[in-house]
Amino acid sequence: MFKSYVVLLSITMLMLVSCGKEASLMKVERAPFGKLPDGRQVEQFTLVNSQGAKAMVITYGAIVNRLYMPDRNGNFADIVLGFDKIDNYLKEPPYFGAIVGRYGNRIGKGQFTLDGKTYQLATNNGPNHLHGGVAGFDKVLWSAETVKSDSAVGVKLFYLSRDGEEGYPGNLKLEVTYWLTNLNQLRIDYLATTDQATIVNPTHHGYFNLAGHGEGDILGHELMIAADYFTPVDETLIPSGELRPVQGTPFDFTTPTAIGARIGEADQQLQYGQGYDHNWVLTKETGKLGLAASVYEASSGRYMEVYTTEPGMQFYCGNFLDGTFTGKEGKRYNHRYGLCLEAQHYPESPNKPDFPSVVLRPGETYTQTTMYQFSVR
């Protein structure tokens, strides 16, 4: 009995030492990241987990500026597109790594009607409203604080979107928390409240390249999307309201398929988007965290799974990247050098009663969780 007690005590001590070692490796560092034209300071939070993975988040746009994950040989690379300096983010950017909203994605003609009143938003994407307008969440300065748990480090960001901002009704209080866990997960938790009925659909607009940012196009990445339907669009990329089966179309990613395998097919939807820029209707249960998509890059062995509580997933494969953006370390971002998997409600939902509702009312709380899980094969 005494021997059993000693063995149990030894195991317990080893577990405590291991947990203590993990905790000592986890850290959050806070540093300046330049200033806005009005003199306000932008900060960068560097999250480091016990495995050596690293996420760097800036307070302008709540942007994930860098994300280092290991390949199959244990070598780390930055796998998200972005810029070295704040000045580049202040120009007309492609939303690299940002939180977009209030309404991520498109609203036709920038109009919606809520409780009998019609609201006019900016039309900043041809005839339509996109990603919150001229100065959406990606173009504002957030306040922030560090957070920590036994198995993760993070940064919690806060923003008050005032009544009438970009045409939206209600004072919306939004919290977004990025967690980097010891399992190499980048988890994003959202929470919002309002004092007036409004619409809410924020999402994370990260551009991923699992070979490393600037390391070629993503057409060889193998993609799976857990969806049997997608929402076809018109020539301005506004959904018609139809839920179209993916089976037998280039939009069928129910089994892992190279992104470039069918992207050149003579399909009207691909022509409208100049490639993939569409919303998929996820098969998982809305409101519960479930698998939405996965991506595999063979040369590095990096494998990314996307879990979300949201009903939809916008897959965009960098069709409008054209080499005019020079990213981190002077790397040029050419055509289709990054892919986006944006967990969301469907575009045009405020004008499509059959789509899941995006209305938030006083006394209610909007929540969403999306998680990017990284491993190797």
Image (tube, rainbow, N blue to C red):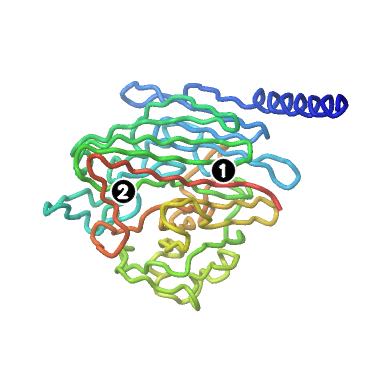
Q: Is residue 34 above or below residue 237?
A: above
Q: Nearer the viewer, residue 140 or 335?
A: 140
Q: Secondary structure at mark 1?
A: loop
Amino acid at circle 2: Tyr
Q: Which residue is mark 1?
A: 331
Q: x, y (%) of residue 24?
A: 66, 23
Vertical comparison of 162 with 243: above or below: above
Residue depicted at x 37% and y 44%: 100
Q: Which residue is mark 2?
A: 103
Q: Position of residue 2 (x, y in %)?
A: 86, 24
Furthest residue toward front: 1
Q: Position of residue 288 (x, y in %)?
A: 46, 52
**Identity, as a three-letter code, of the amino acid under mark 1:** Lys
Is disc 1 surrounded by few (<14), some (14 to 19) or many (20+) residues within 10 Å? Answer: some
Count every numbered label the image shows and give the total. Answer: 2
**Quadrant location, the N terminus:** top right
Q: Nearer the viewer, mark 2 or mark 1?
A: 2
Q: Nearer the viewer, residue 135 or 3?
A: 3
Q: Is residue 299 left or right of residue 176?
A: right
Residue sitting at x 34%, y 53%: 105
Whether the residues at callouts 2 and 1 have beta carbons within 8 Å, the answer is no
Q: Residue placed farthest to the left in the image?
A: 116
Please, is residue 199 above or below residue 141 in the view? Answer: below
Residue for point 51% across, 41% down:
187
Label 2 and label 1: CA atoms lie apart by 31 Å
Q: In terms of sequence position, does the residue under pointer 2 or pointer 1 come before the other?
A: 2
